[in-house]
Image: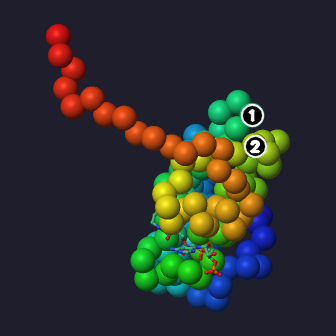
Amino acid sequence: MTLSKTELPKGYVLDVNDDTPVPIVRVLTSEHMEAAIGRVVFVGHFAIYDRIETNLRHRRNGLASIVMKTLEALAINRGIRKGILVATTEGKVLYEKLGWSVYTPYMTAVIPEIKD
Ligand SMILES: CC(C)(COP(=O)(O)OP(=O)(O)OC[C@H]1O[C@@H](n2cnc3c(N)ncnc32)[C@H](O)[C@@H]1OP(=O)(O)O)[C@@H](O)C(=O)NCCC(=O)NCCS
């Protein structure tokens, strides 16, 4: 599919695999090394964004922002404009810059062992 690549910094290439149940967007270096990646799944009216990550050496170049915008474009192509994700502390700053807001603090609970 054709996507705007105008914001991609020089030396990077956008790779979009939309032909799968879990579309994947990657930013590759000119040597075809993975610099950033993200995934999205569609459930009802929601797009669920997951495992957004930029390789340490390529951070703060806008790559995760481009991955997110490209994933959002895949959702919009399907008529889906609502999104949800669980953010790390680093991710929270990124997503807020992209217009997301906190819905609820996330809490993880574990049970060490289920007794009979
Ligand atoms: C969070 C993460 C994906 C950001 O990737 P990135 O490619 O560096 O992000 P961008 O360059 O697009 O950042 C865009 C903006 O988000 C904010 N931002 C991103 N990372 C930040 C950080 N570590 N600290 C403060 N602000 C940050 C900044 O405002 C930044 O703009 P600026 O560089 O002009 O100040 C990356 O740090 C990462 O992979 N972290 C480990 C995995 C992770 O936590 N992923 C998120 C899962 S929810």
Q: Does 100 sit above or below residue 93?
A: above
**Image location of residue 53, percent across then percent down:** 49, 64
Where the C terminus falls, by quadrant?
Answer: top left
Query: Which mark is drawn over residue 82?
Result: 2
Query: Which mark is drawn over residue 45?
Result: 1
At horizontal 27% and vertical 29% (from top left) the residue drawn is 111
Q: Does 35 sit above or below residue 39?
A: below
Asked whether 2 or 103 is in front, the reply is 103
**Label 2 sits on what residue type?**
Lys
**Label 1 sits on what residue type?**
His
Q: Please tell me in which quarter of the rendered image ligand 1 is found.
A: bottom right
**Image location of residue 18, percent across then percent down:** 64, 51
Give the side of residue 76 with respect to residue 94, left or right: right
For the residue labelled by badge 1, is the local secondary structure a helix, a strand or a loop? loop
Asked whether 2 or 70 is in front, the reply is 70
Asked if the residue at tag 2 contacts the one at tag 1, i.e. Cβ–Cβ closer than 8 Å, the answer is yes
- The residue most toward the bottom is 10
Q: How is the image coloured?
A: rainbow
Residue 10 appears in the rendering:
yes
